[in-house]
Amino acid sequence: MRTQESTIDHVTLDAVENRVHRLCREYAERLQFHGWHHVSFVRAKAAGFAQHNGADRGVVEVAALVHDVNYLVLRNSPAAAGSGLRGEILAECGVADGVARWIDEIVDEAEMATRGRDISLEAQALSDADTLFKALPVTPVVLAHRYLRENGLSLRELADKIVGEQCDVHDEGYYFYNPEAAATYSRWAMANLQLWQCIQEAVDDPTVVELLDAVDAVAS
């Protein structure tokens, strides 16, 4: 386990946490998937991964706190869509301009849809935490319907997104960067991806489509 002195002090970290928490409470109806439950989980796990890989823990925690503010700017958007709001939050909380730009870069670098094999230690810690949330066995059961509502997607669109963004990364061997995370959680990840591949197949069955339409009609 490697550690380094953090660039972010506790006062600033607490300020960012309080600001993001208030936003999550204020916009809870819009952030049904990416609300405080998600942010706090990713922050806690990212801090642990940062502690393990020698990343700047404070910077990683702040990046985790602001990594999904894009969903307040635009539904179903990439992390880059939140850059302006992220900058406003960080400036308001006293984060220096250079550090704020670094945090913004970490958030973009860690994004599942575009991340590569060789990313910074800080981005690895954030990515592993966010990826773990996706791979949790409870996520498709308890939270997938919230993602659909939050982002205005159909089940087919979500299945295509998950399989399209995650399967190649998994197959190429860097779904998780942390070796212990890979050893512990890869079975969950594989099961999750197989589930969504099965969902892709299922929504091509006309009878399943009729079933889903009937469920939607009852729900509405």
Image (cartoon, rainbow, N blue to C red):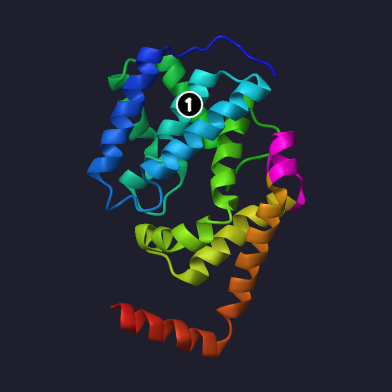
Q: Can the viewer see residue 50 in this picture?
A: yes
Magenta run includes residue 183: yes
Query: Which residue reaches farthest top?
Result: 5
Residue 157 image position (x, y, % from top left): 50, 67
Crowdedness near tag 1: few (<14), some (14–19) or many (≥20) residues, C-alpha within 10 Å: many
SS at badge 1: helix
On the rendered structure, is 71 left or right of 42?
left
- Span of residues in magenta: 171-184
Q: Is residue 115 above or below residue 208?
A: above
x 44%, y 25%: residue: 62
Q: Position of residue 210 (x, y in %)?
A: 46, 88
The picture places residue 195, in percent across and down from the top left corner, at 63, 66
Instruction: Please name the residue that numbered disc 1 is placed on.
Output: 61
The question of residue 167 being in magenta is answered with no
Residue at x 36%, y 62% (from the top left corner): 149
Q: Is residue 28 left or right of residue 197?
A: left
Vertical side of 197 occupied by 51: above or below: above
Position of residue 198 in the picture relative to residue 62 (left or right) = right
Residue 97 is situated, as x and y percent measured from the top left of the image, at 39, 16
Query: Which amino acid is tagged 1?
Result: Glu
User: Considering depth in this image, is 185 or 61 the residue closer to the camera?
Assistant: 185
Residue under the image location 29 percent in, 29 percent down: 19
Q: Quadrant of the N terminus?
A: top right
Rendered view: 136 above or below 123: below
The residue positioned 30% from the left and 27% from the top of the image is 18
